[in-house]
Image (tube, grey):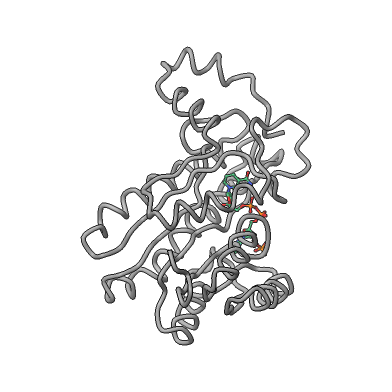
Amino acid sequence: MNWKGKTVFLTGASSGIGEGLALALARRGASLGLAARRREMLDDLKQRCEEAGGEAMAFSCDVTDPDALEKAARDFRDEFGHIDVAIANAGIGGNNEETRSFDPVAVKKVIDINLLGAVNMVHAVLPSMKERKSGHLVAISSLAGFRGLPKSAAYCASKAGMTAFFESVRLDVMHDGIDVTIIQPGFIKTPLTSGRKHKMPYLMELDDAIPLFIQAIEKKKRFSAFPWQLATIVRAARCMPGWMYDRFAGKRRYRE
Ligand code: NDP
């Protein structure tokens, strides 16, 4: 696929997967709208994207603020004309005592950012994509959205919700020239997974994972789950009866 001149609006661009994707797409010549809260990191990334051969605009905004996100998407369109690909990537792990004890405020924060933040992004970009009868929505969901995991109720709920939301959106927009790709990665080394004490199975280096994200987007896959080893285990776990799954998953502690 030729990314030269393609316009990509990306949330959660300031670190980890978002930063890696931005740089990889800039190297391919894409024009990027970089959204996240930390302005300094975005400004620095914008410069690196431009040095890498792309064009970039930075938007300091919170995905939980629909008006701010809508304005960012509008400003990006005003500069570059339209949005070809919009990637809902902003997210938090919410890996703390409060979410583990199901504190409603802490759980709401995870859902607000991971799920409703993605909804806000879709709302900000979809009308103009529909008008043009062209566009591509990409959700960075997770293998954690397949089935409940211990110590991860908030995160799993947010990612299961995200997967279901984008699959439903696909059914609503597939006749409008709009594609929807749902990416479900396993564990990737980023600030989100750093500092965990327990072993994360099939943990991937960010540099090894980024080409898999790009391949899924270029091929306009409906779903892309990786690494294949963990994706296979998770798919098999989805078929297990409840009693068997409880035994299999109940003792795992990789989110601590
Ligand atoms: P990072 O913590 O490195 O990046 C998260 C990004 O989200 C940052 O750019 C952060 O920017 C942004 N963000 C967080 N909250 C908000 C907010 N309220 N408004 C705007 N931006 C926000 O984590 P990853 O790169 O690992 O995660 C990216 C996505 O990938 C997440 O959705 C995550 O759930 C998903 N994922 C990650 C996996 C992994 O193993 N790493 C596995 C599966 C999925 P800022 O703080 O500047 O706002």
16 over 100 or under it: above or below: below
Q: Residue at x 21, y 60 (%)?
A: 175
Give the quarter the ligand 1 occupies: bottom right
Give the quarter of the image for residue 203. top right
Farthest front residue?
A: 2
Image mark count: 0
The residue nearer to you, when weighing 85 against 110, is 85
Tell me where residue 112 appears, x and y as whole percent: 53, 55
59 over 204 or under it: above or below: below
Q: Is residue 123 left or right of residue 76?
A: left
Q: Residue at x 46, y 34 (%)?
A: 146
Tell me where residue 83 appears, x and y as whole percent: 42, 74
The residue nearer to you, when weighing 29 against 10, is 29
Farthest left residue?
A: 175
Tell me where residue 160 appears, x and y as whole percent: 45, 41
Q: Residue at x 49, y 79 (%)?
A: 71
* The N terminus: image quadrant: bottom left
Q: Is residue 111 left or right of residue 251?
A: left
Tell me where residue 245 appears, x and y as whole percent: 49, 18
Q: Residue at x 48, y 31 (%)?
A: 147
* The C terminus: image quadrant: top right
Farthest bottom residue?
A: 79
103 over 56 or under it: above or below: above
The residue nearer to you, when weighing 35 against 232, is 232
